[in-house]
Image (tube, rainbow, N blue to C red):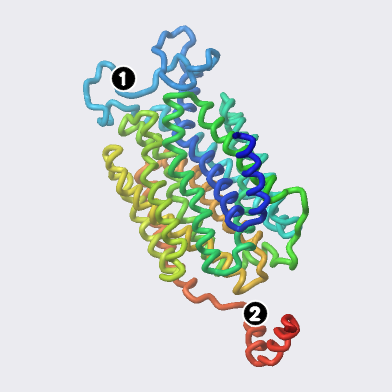
Amino acid sequence: MVLEWLYGFRRWLREEHRSRKLILFIVFVALLLDTMLMTVVVPIVPDLLYQLDMAEAAPQNSSVSLYNSSVNTSASSPVSTVTRPGPTARPGNSSSPGNSSDCPPYESSLVNENLKVGLLFASKSMVQLLINTAIGPLTNRIGYQIPMFAGFCIMFLSTIMFAFSSSYALLFVARSLQGVGSSCSSVAGLGMLASVYTDDEERSHAIGIAIGGPAMGWFLGPPFGSLTYEFVGKTAPFLILAFVALFNGALQMFVLQPTRVEPESQKGTSLFTLMKDPYIIIAAGAICFGNMGIAMMEPTLPLWMMETMCAQEWQLGVVFLPASFSYLVGANVFGTLALRWGRWLCALIGMVLVGFSVICVPLARDMYGLILPNLAVGFALGMVDSSMMPIMGYLVDLRHVSVYGSVYAIGDVAFCLAFALGPSIGGTVAETLGFPWLMLIIGLLDVLFAPLCVFLRNPPGSEEKISARDTSAQNPDRINENTDSENPD
């Protein structure tokens, strides 16, 4: 029975070899895994690093109660004798758990974790930022298949490292290594989709589905990480992700056959020429500033909740669930709808909505008060990403040579810049000015950037392409001759 199923699956893969839908599925899963690995650590790392620091600071001869965490599963873990701050750690206080007086004060070491957590989260995007400048041109020379498979291999190694790392240094290396794999997967994956979906409407729909992978990763990652961390153990979520990564790698071997070099048939526009295009820069800027709000919230919101709400481990990840769900909805809905309404308009509205939503986040007094602003942040961000990612491929078709590796490297650079500057700067600002001021600053930046999207309403084509279209319009007989020569019957 199993052998028959495996034989049928193998035959289906051969029949569907190089199918556009199968390629879309592979890219979707690759982006899903990348984002899940990026977000599954959001509820784990702040609490884990706090416990590690408290273990180092605590006297070895002091007797403290056991901390019910997954790190206790290891007998040699340095955090197995540390109590997490909160109402249960302060038995003399009878106030409700939501009262900030029960939680660690602002001057405590808990808030001082902002900078360390921010740098750890930002390391992935900083590395990815550097690697992207090389991956884009590389795909033009050797094709998309080999970089895509290399991304899977590196991502798998990073996932295994996360599972068994027990120090800040090893976590930092694993996070940085993930940036290399993420760069390969995202740039090669989106470039591959743009090359196989040549129609603008089909491409917009396909990329909308593809970025649904990161949307689902944001939807599943934080709650999946927090629940498994508290009730199963630290290694469990990473081992599960490693297993799914192996499945995706097997699909890539069958479908993409990443052993052959398949360079582009024409030489693409250089990366630096594309970076000087003002319309591409505006689209990339919208991606960067739109994502910077959630990038700053990821390392700082859990710590702010622990400080003001005495949030438990599972709550630190579940709080991102509304934003993840609404992003998934927004990205899929506006993948096609943005083409009809106007991508520039959807991006403009999305930027404004992101700005006002993040400003409202610190107004919440408990976890339930965070639901509505997080819903708005996720939905608006889905509007921005599903509008700007396809328009970057459209701008290349309109103004440059239709080779897409470099332009999606720029798009990924913009995304990485948000998740590199966001956690690092956000952690510093949250530590010095406070979390509410951090949200106010990034919210105002989003609102101020939004009007620039108007310039994407009707971008002009390049002079060479305009003159080529004019020549074709003035010489219809030449077109007919070419058509007749291609169709002699």
Q: The residue tagged with tag 1: helix, strand or loop?
A: helix
Task: Measuring from the top left, give residue 20's x and y in whole percent.
Answer: 61, 58
C-alpha separation, residue under disc 2 versus residue under disc 1: 69 Å
Observer-nearest residue: 376 or 480? 480
Q: Amino acid at mark 2?
A: Lys
**Which numbered marker is on residue 88?**
1
Q: Quadrant of residue 174?
A: top right
Say above or below: 386 vs 80: below
Residue 60 in view (yes/no): yes
Residue position for label 2: 465
**Position of residue 358 in the picture relative to residue 285 (left or right):** left
* Viewer-closest of 179 and 451: 179
Classify mark 1: residues with Cα within 10 Å, few (<14), some (14-19) or many (20+). Answer: some
The image shows residue 266 at horizontal and vertical percentages of 74, 68
Tell me the residue at 34%/52% (across/down): 376
Instruction: Establish if 73 lies above or below 373.
Output: above
Is residue 339 rendered to the left or right of residue 246? left
State which quarter of the image contains the C terminus: bottom right
Where's residue 452, x and y in %?
46, 68
Residue drawn at x 43%, y 9% as measured from the top left = 62
